[in-house]
Every structure is written in C-alpha cells, then in structure tokens.
Amino acid sequence: MANRLAAETSPYLLQHADTPVDWWPWSPEAFEEARRRDVPVLLSVGYSSCHWCHVMAEESFADETTAAYLNAHYVSVKVDREERPDVDAVYMEAVQAATGQGGWPMTVFLTPDGEPFYFGTYFPPVPRHGMPSFRQVLEGVHAAWTDRREEVAEVAGRIVGELAGRGIGYAEGTRPRPPGPDELGAALLALTREFDSVYGGFGGAPKFPPSMVLEFLLRHHARTGSEGALQMVEATCEAMARGGIHDQLGGGFARYSVDARWVVPHFEKMLYDNALLCRVYAHLWRATGSERARRVALDTADFMVRELRTPQGGFASALDADSPVPDGESGTGGPHKEGAYYVWTPAQLREVLGEDDADLAAAYFGVTEEGTFEEGASVLRLPDTDGPVDAERIESVRRRLLDARSRRPRPGRDDKVVAAWNGLAIAALAEVGAYFDRPDLTEAAVAAADLLIAVHLDARGRLARTSRDGKAGPGAGVLEDHGDVAEGFLALYAVTGETCWLELAGVLLDAVLDHFTAPDGTLYDTADDAERLIRRPQDPTDNAAPSGWTAAAAALLTYAAHTGSARHREAAERALGVVRALAPRAPRFIGWGLAAAEAALDGPREIAVVGPAGDPATAALHRTALLAGAPGAVVAVGEPEAEETTPLLRDRPLLDGRPAAYVCRHFVCGLPTAEPEELAEAVGTAEAVRA
C-alpha cells in the first residue's frame, strides 16, 4: 500500500496522506488502475475546512479495518473540490439529480470509465438515523459490482445520458438580451416575499450571507430610488454585523448561521465570503454613509490581510471551523472541536477581564451561563441596541479578549491560493483602500495581483486554478477564475490608473471568449481544451460565490465600457440573457447576474478623469468618481494627452487648464466639469460620503 497524496499541493489532500487508505489523486492513472484490477472507483470529494469531511476521515478512513476493505475492493480517489471545481460540479450534479440533495463530503462510486452509479455524502461508521454504515455501503456496492454488473452498467449509462441532456443553450436565431426594468422589478418583488423582516436575510435556517443579492439591491436602489431595496440591505447588514456570524473580536464572517437569527455560525471562515461581504459593506457605506458599515468593511479587510495573507502575498482559502482542544477538555468532541477558538463562558471572561469588566462584556456580547452554543459557551454578538456605551472601555475589553483568544489553539488554515477568490479579494481591498484612505490595503491587493501574474498566469493568457507556497497546482483555471480575476484587475485599474491592469483583464477575457464560450453565446465552466469529464460542466447560477457565467458577464461588461469593444459588450449581453429568465423565478441564486444587469441597464456610466498625477484637484475628482453610486460605474484616470492611454481617456482635454471629469454612456459624453460637486450630482455620489 502506498498512499500517493504526499506529493500533492492541496492541504486537504495532504491531510489524508498518512491515512491507511491507498488514496490516489484524480488522475488517468487511477482509473487505469481500476480498469486493470476490474474494481470500481470510490470518489471522495471534500475540502480542508469541511467539518463533516474531518469527521468521516477520523471515523472511517483512519480505521485500519475499513481501509483494508477499501484497498482490497476499490481504487480510492480523493479530490479537493476547491482545487478541482469541475470534477466536483459534474459529480455533485449527479448526486443531486439522484438523491435530491448534496453536500460534502461527497461520496460517489464510479466505473473505471468515470461513470457514476451510486451516491451519497457523509456515511457514519455504524448505522444511524436511518443511514447505513459506511462499511455496509462498501459491501453492498462491492456485491452489486461483482454479482450484478449489467445492472450497474445500465444505471451508470442512464445517469450519464441524463446529465448529457442538461446543457444550456439559446434557441437558434435568437439574440439573448439582458433583463429589462420589468424583469429586475419582478426579481425585487420575489426577494421581498422571501425577505425575513424580523431577522434580516432571506429564507430560514440555515441562513447564508446573501452578499451578491445585497449588491443587486444596492444597485437597484441607486438606479430606481427604491427604498424597499435599500431597507432590505440595511436590515440584513445590521443583523449580520451584530450577530454571531460576524467575529466581534477579530473581524470577518463565518460561512453561515445554523439558525435564522444569525446567532450561532458554522465557524469556518472562507475567503470568498469575506471578500464579497467586505465589498458589500463598503458599498453600503458609499450609499448611506453608515458608520457601522464603514467599520465592518475595514474590520473585514483587516481580517483578510492579518489572518489569510500568505508569505507570497496571496490570500489563503479558509480557516477551519474546528480547532484543537487541550487534553482533558475535549469531552465527546475528540481532539478537535468546532468553534472552540471563538466561544466564551462567563468564567472565561472573568479569568481574562476581572469581575467588573467581565460583567460589562457579558452584557455587551450576550454571554450567559446557559450559553448559546455547546456546554454553556456563548458565541459573541451584540444583542442589545439600547443604552449608552462606554466606547473606550468596550475597546479595551475587546483588545484584551482578542489577545487572550490569540493564545488558544488556532483553527487550521487552508493556505492554498485560489485564483477566483483572490480576484474577489483584490477587488474588495482595492476599493476599500481607496474609499477609506488606506493605501496599505490597496498595496495588499496589488501584491496579490502580482502573485497571480507571476505564478498562475501562463504564456497563453490562461490561469492555473490554485497555487501553494508559490507553486502552481495541478488544476487548470475554470471560468470563474478568469472572470473573478478580471474583475479584480479592473477594480485595480479604476483605483490606481495603471493601464497594465486593464490590459491584463483584456487578456483573461479574450481567453473567456476564445475558450469558454459556445457559438450561441452560452458559457462553459471549463475550457474547450480542458480534461474531458463525463460532461462539460455549465451552470449560470450563483452559489457561495459568483458563478463563472455571471462573473464573466460582469467583467466583460466593465471591460467593454472601458474600451468600447463591441465584441465584449455583445458577449456580456448574450451571457446575461440567462439572467432574464431566472430573475423573476430564482433571484436569490442569480444575484451577481442581477447586479451586472443593473449596470447594463444604467449604461454602465463611464467616468473619465483627466489631470496631472499628484494634483489635488485630479485626486478630488477621482475620489468622487470612485464613490459614484451609479450601478457598476467604470472609472478611468490619467494624464491629459498621454502618449499611451486607454480608449475612455483618449481625446479628453483639460477644462480651461484644470483637471476635468467626463461622464459618458457608450462613449457619448456630457459636458466636462472641473467641480467635484457637479460630478457627484451626475454620478450619484451620496452626499454623506462626499467629504
């Protein structure tokens, strides 16, 4: 037996490198071995911060008897879903089609040709709650493979056939169009029906942060003046900021709340959630001037830089939900325990703060003897909205608790750098740095972008999906990588004015058009020359982060507004055609597409600022432009009549020798202005943030 994961770059795969299971990474050699031995493949898909993945690993894959049975009767393949989202997407679609649900760990049994025939997620070590044990499943699948091979082949063939028929395409001869005012209004109405008016957010438990939907609602408010749209954003952002899903000491957000009130989170912290939410809170501040939104945006940005930044300048994928607990304190939770790093009891507060400040902290953060989590511990939140607060004393309490927490055993960190999620982080940090005069945050965005160029981007203009320790991982970049990184580069161009970022975004978006786009304008998640799976994955709906489809559509639209490229504009509009159909029916699952559609409907507005670099008047106009509320407004800043300039800045003279701003739609511009106040009126910069 030779576990083959030790040479992999994925932290999740490396966590399984010492188990007794004879794991293979996803590779042609693994399937050839299954064919040679005439055994099925066990495909196990998970990720580093997945709690139940760790549980199943400890219960089953670390068990010598179970491992011996697996090694004798299967070829076992372990996949990190974050490293190979294409593999995950294809087989998750099969699991959901067959069982009506999905999740991780995902457990799929395949023929040596990669065709799935039996599915599941977590299986316990003994029968429990109506679920068979993992050993029972293994024995049952082995018996079917040995004694009923024809039945297995029939099931596998039927599933592959059904998946092949699920492709998305536009009718021949049609010209797909983005949603118009009617469809976007219907999306708002549908969201209003699903909005939780008591606790904020949408739907019930578990409740996920609806970052992309909030971005749509902010843009819809900016375009239409809808107070209802803004109220849903304000209520949701306030509830999340005060809830246990928000780390009240260290900043940043957990993956989701297990309850509808945002009290108890699933404690893993993902880069994509924090990047998206950082940007949402910054845009809420931009719209309203909310002090809480400003503070949360900055706290979240600081969390990403402090906790997720890698030595190479990129951003790690996640912090685990679980952390080690000292011997004697694990109870039934085992050597690792979910949430142990974050929760507090009144006794722990007294130990760190003393009696008086502990009482203050308990009241302020909602820590009780009964607790809100396990074993009488409480998740910190801000439940009391009334009464005066001694801000200086509270800040002292917060610092001391954070210092004490930092000495606890820390959650594990998945330190692989995912291109797409770093693109989202680059966009957030660039904007927050510009909004709040934090050049260190913009510099962190540039450093992450430099890493993507140096390590992820190849000579063909294509991205690697992941890297670790400055070394690219094995997976090719998918559509979301190219779309989200282009989004990040476009945000950097708007903030810095450095044309290289616009040019690099164009390289990535040309790859999207050349290798990810079908002749009818629909998009695929994998390139036309990528590894062939049982079907080429294609999904426009947003999940925890923007889908590749909507990420590409949004970036194509922005790039076209900068360059005037009809090719990119038409591609964006064709891609947004699918949003037109989904907007009224499933707006919660197409939020990024809806946000892009709002930008398309508004133009988006193009703001060109010309003036000498370093001139305070140029800087004032540039800042006003960056704070534009107009949906998806694009901003270019540069020297007048520079030899090398971008199309939006070309032939834009100064105004009577003074720096000037031009506001345009589709390159048709109004009269220039040298006055920030006039520019603010033209582009919807809120009065509360103009100073």
Image (cartoon, rainbow, N blue to C red):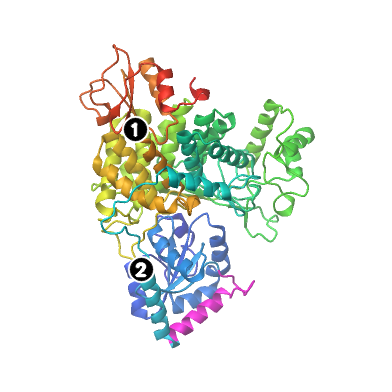
In this rendering, position of residue 17 left or right of residue 339: left
Q: Looking at the picture, how far across and down is residue 274, in whole percent?
A: 51, 43
Given residues 9 and 186, the one toward you in this image is: 186
Give the residue furthest to the left. 643
Given residues 533 and 470, the one toward you in this image is: 533
Q: Nearer the viewer, mark 1 or mark 2?
A: 2
Say whether residue 10 is magenta: no
Mark 1 sits on what residue? 493
Question: Picture quarter containing residue 499?
Answer: top left
Instruction: Kindly identify the residue that appears in the image at 47 percent across and 35 percent down.
Output: 224
Q: Which residues are magenta?
A: 123-146
Q: Looking at the picture, how far across and down is residue 293, in whole percent?
A: 56, 33
Residue 271 visible in the shown view: no
Q: Secondary structure at mark 2?
A: loop
- The type of residue carrying mark 1 is Tyr
Say whether residue 133 is magenta: yes
Residue 666 visible in the shown view: yes
Mark 2 sits on what residue? 165
In this rendering, position of residue 165 left or right of residue 651: right
